[in-house]
Image: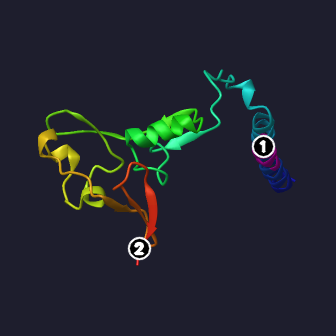
Amino acid sequence: MLVLNFFISIKNHDMLTMYVIASIFGGYIASSLILFKFPNLIHKRKKLKFFCQHISHRGGAGEYAENTLSAFENAVKQGTDMLEIDLHLTKDEKVVVSHDNNLLRVTGVDVNISDSNYKDLPLLKRDIGLNKDISLNFNSKKTSRNSKK
């Protein structure tokens, strides 16, 4: 009889452990589903300062030379809500508007903005390739697209 009581108590103990684990797991699943459906129970909604529908990346790269005043002016004329630009500091702590820290793509010179003084930065190339089929030509006031041959 003593042996039988021992096995019954082990089975009851194992069942109790399973009920506790199942309850914890079930509570976790239930609370996850509730918070997934209603996240504002924990996090308050942020009030938007303004509603932005159009952002011009690099001032509208592909239409004008990226990160230039002509690109920014064109984006504003087109009705953009926000201009996105990239800024870097030179060695002498001057601000330079450029997507890349390394200027090889836009100048043909392998130099980092952060390693150079402002006066030593190279000039931009006239033609900056966008990909293997398209390049921009900056010889005229308005940029024209020319296919590479």
Instruction: Check the image and tell me how it is coloured.
Output: rainbow
Q: Does the magenta segment cover residue 18?
A: yes
Locate residue 144: give its quadrant: bottom left
Side of 61 where 13 appears, left or right: right
Q: Residue at x 82, y 52 (%)?
A: 11
Q: Residue furthest front?
A: 140
User: Where the C terminus falls, by quadrant?
Assistant: bottom left
Q: Position of residue 78 (x, y in %)?
A: 58, 39
User: Would you say the magenta stretch is mainly helix, strand or loop?
Assistant: helix
Label 2 secondary element: loop
Q: Nearer the viewer, residue 130 or 28?
A: 130
Q: Which residue is mark 1?
A: 29
Please report the bounds of the magenta region as a residue range: 15-24
Q: Position of residue 133 (x, y in %)?
A: 46, 72
Side of 80 where 109 appears, left or right: left
Instruction: Please state which amino acid type lies under the numbered disc 2.
Output: Lys
Q: Position of residue 30 (x, y in %)?
A: 81, 39
Looking at the image, is mark 2 or mark 1 nearer the viewer?
2
Side of 100 where 84 appears, left or right: right
How many numbered badges does the structure rendering display?
A: 2
